[in-house]
Amino acid sequence: AQKVTQAQTEISVVEKEDVTLDCVYETRDTTYYLFWYKQPPSGELVFLIRRNSFDEQNEISGRYSWNFQKSTSSFNFTITASQVVDSAVYFCALSGRGYSTLTFGKGTMLLVSP
Amino acid sequence: KAGVTQTPRYLIKTRGQQVTLSCSPISGHRSVSWYQQTPGQGLQFLFEYFSETQRNKGNFPGRFSGRQFSNSRSEMNVSTLELGDSALYLCASSSGTSGSGGELFFGEGSRLTVL
């Protein structure tokens, strides 16, 4: 069975602080994909990144960066110089053979105050 | 291109009634998945349809059903509503092929309240 754990339920930071959202996963599949989604108050889940299990390169996109470590089954997400618009719930997710079937973590609510 | 469209956005029902939710995927996408989001259980997979066939199913009772039409639009139905069915129901579309790697595009959801 697959499992995604986001231990941080809620994080509060002040604007311009860096923040890291943790994600730990469990799977028996050798081929799998990891995702991060952002959910603003409107409810729509916004895709941020996808990583496959064979690509452990870290990725940076603007203020966002992701650290994938297979050895610790973690896929952490860092926002540099956070902004108020980053306030949202962030979900880490995992898919295996059923490519359109995602297992989500419980989410981390990020509150960025001015 | 247009995103995933879900209707209705909000609805209120009473226990015992049934409800039908609709989802129009992104043009060209053949896979539609449904997820239920509640504060207690989080996001849970309901089912996935690909080319009018149910391809995957989550662990939900038979009261939850769905279908997909030839134009890839999908509907999900919940019969004999219970209070615990109150949730945000999210629809997601994807190309559905293995190369998509599970990249899903979500709609804004239908928020169901059962009284």
Image (cartoon, rainbow, N blue to C red):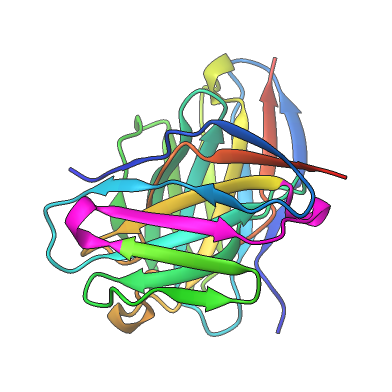
Please name the residue shown 70% across and 84% down the image: B1
Which one is in front, A111 or A99? A111
Give the quadrant of residue A80: bottom right
Q: Is residue A66 magenta?
A: no
Left or right of residue B42, residue B102 in this image: left
Q: Residue B45's x, y, as percent? A: 40, 45
Residue at 72% x, 78% y is: B2
Q: Does residue B65 sit above or below B101 in this rendering?
A: above
Q: Quadrant of the N terminus of chain A?
A: top left
Q: Residue at x 49, y 69 (%)?
A: A49
In this image, B54 relative to B70: left or right?
left
Pick whichever, B104 or B67, lies toward us.
B104
Q: Report if residue A108 is visible in the image.
A: yes
When the figure is inspected, residue A98 is found, relative to residue A5, above or below; the finding is below
* Quadrant in the picture for the C terminus of chain A: top right
> Residue A97 location in percent, x, y?
21, 64
Magenta-colored span: A69-87
In the rendered image, the residue lying farthest to the right is: A114
Please state if B92 lies on the left or on the right of A88 as rendered. Answer: left
Percent position of residue A63, x then y? 65, 69
- Evaluate whether residue B104 shows in this view: no
Q: How many marks?
A: 0
Residue A101 lies in quadrant? bottom left
Let me know if residue A72 is in the magenta part. yes
Place of residue B54 in the rendered image (x, y in percent of width and height, measured from the top left): 32, 59
Outermost residue on the front side: it is A17
Tell me: residue A32, above or below residue B66.
below
Residue at 61 percent of width and 55 percent of height: A38
